[in-house]
Image (cartoon, rainbow, N blue to C red):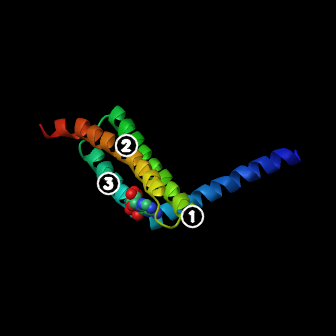
Amino acid sequence: MQKKESFFINRLKSIGFAFKGMLILIKTEASIQVQLFITIVVTFAGFYFEISRTEWLIQITIIGLVISIEGMNTAVEYIADFVHPEYHKKIGLIKDVAAGAVFIASIIAVIIAGIIYIPKFN
Ligand SMILES: Nc1ncnc2c1ncn2[C@@H]1O[C@H](COP(=O)(O)OP(=O)(O)OP(=O)(O)O)[C@@H](O)[C@H]1O
């Protein structure tokens, strides 16, 4: 019983830490703020163009993917700056690769947006 209680309390604490991390990302990361603005715009677009249930699912999934990877990219930047605050070729490579991951998800997001919304203008 004691063990079970501490398990749930620990899980609740973890959710608290994760929530704190999410707020830090929203408050401090310009790229996350831009992505949240885009999220608001495409959410309005989704209602305006009355996109289908499947289109909503895909739209929400890709938004979640882009913002989540952006968050991981920020974490990689924090680690890189912590372990090696000075300029280093390897740190540049690590940050570029992390940014590249966000870029891949963003390209896919733009393609998905095109597939969903371009036909609505025809
Ligand atoms: N310590 C470093 N050594 C070498 N190159 C670096 C270093 N710090 C940054 N860079 C280069 O500058 C780029 C931008 O790094 P920075 O940490 O400023 O990210 P950012 O512009 O804040 O990215 P984001 O917009 O995703 O938060 C890196 O991708 C890398 O090419």
SS for tag 3? helix
SS for tag 1? helix
Mark 3 / mark 1, whichever is N-terminal: 3
Residue 115 makes an appearance in the image: yes
- As drawn, is 76 to the left or to the right of 97? right
Which residue is the extreme one toward the front? 89
Q: Identify the residue position indicated by label 3 in the image.
A: 38
Which residue is the extreme one toward the right? 2
Mark 2 / mark 3, whichever is N-terminal: 3
SS for tag 2? helix
Residue 82 badge: 1
* Most foreground residue, 73 or 87: 87
- As drawn, is 103 to the left or to the right of 122? right
Residue 105 badge: 2
CB at disc 3 and ligand 1 closer than 8 Å: no
Q: Which percent across, then down, holds residue 102?
A: 39, 48
